[in-house]
Amino acid sequence: MRFPGPFRLICAVSLMAACCAPLSAQSLTEKTSKMERLMRADAYSFQSTRSASVWTIHFTGKHLTDIKVILAIAEEPDSDLMVIFVTVAEKAHLPVTADFMSKLLKENHELDRVKVGYDADGDLFVREDAALRITDEAEMKAIIDQVEKSADEIYGIVQPDLQ
């Protein structure tokens, strides 16, 4: 049986993609090197943590005196997930009201690129998830700046409501 040309092309591309996919996995050492290279290229003063896959950068904002931006990469070789976030306020200080949550949802809609939400501990965060594999110096700077500025802005908005 002879298959039509487009079908053969699709099969060939699919086979090549399946064979090449495992080759794109990066070790933790390679991912760590890239993260540190990107942060150095943008002249960030970053600190390592106990974990090889987590770093912090501190900023001073208009509303928050210490904006602690946390950068983390997935340790699994088949994941290139990078998460950059700020914990804006701890659960103990957050009001649990519909008005407060409505305010956060409206801000979540207004902000570009970032998510505003509650983490597993119930703390308020601002974060952005990205693919380390395709992130360059300019994109890293844009992500960090957006997370840092958005966290400061959100804190300024919710600070009067904090307990």
Image (spheres, grey):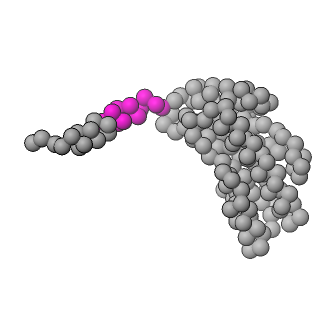
Q: Residue furthest left?
A: 1
Q: Is residue 11 left or right of residue 91?
A: left
Q: Quadrant of residue 32?
A: top right
Q: Is 18 within the magenta?
A: yes
Above-or-below relation of 101 to 77: below
Q: Quadrant of the N terminus?
A: top left
Q: Quadrant of residue 67?
A: top right
- Residue 135: where, in percent of width, then height? 60, 35
**Residue 74, visible in the rendered structure:** no
- Residue 24: where, in percent of width, then height? 46, 31
- Please tell me whether the stretch drawn in magenta is mainly helix, strand or loop: helix
Above-or-below relation of 101 to 22: below
Q: Residue furthest bottom?
A: 98
- Residue 137: where, in percent of width, then height? 67, 31
Q: At 69% from the left edge and 42% from the top edge, which residue is drawn?
A: 143
- Residue 17: where, in percent of width, then height? 36, 36
Q: Which residues are magenta?
A: 15-25
Q: At 51% from the left edge and 29% from the top edge, which residue is drawn?
A: 26
Residue nearest the viewer, comparing 16 with 31 = 16
Q: At 53% from the left edge and 28% from the top edge, which residue is drawn?
A: 27
Q: Quadrant of the C terminus?
A: bottom right
Q: Quadrant of residue 66?
A: top right
Q: At 51% from the left edge and 34% from the top edge, which residue is drawn?
A: 77
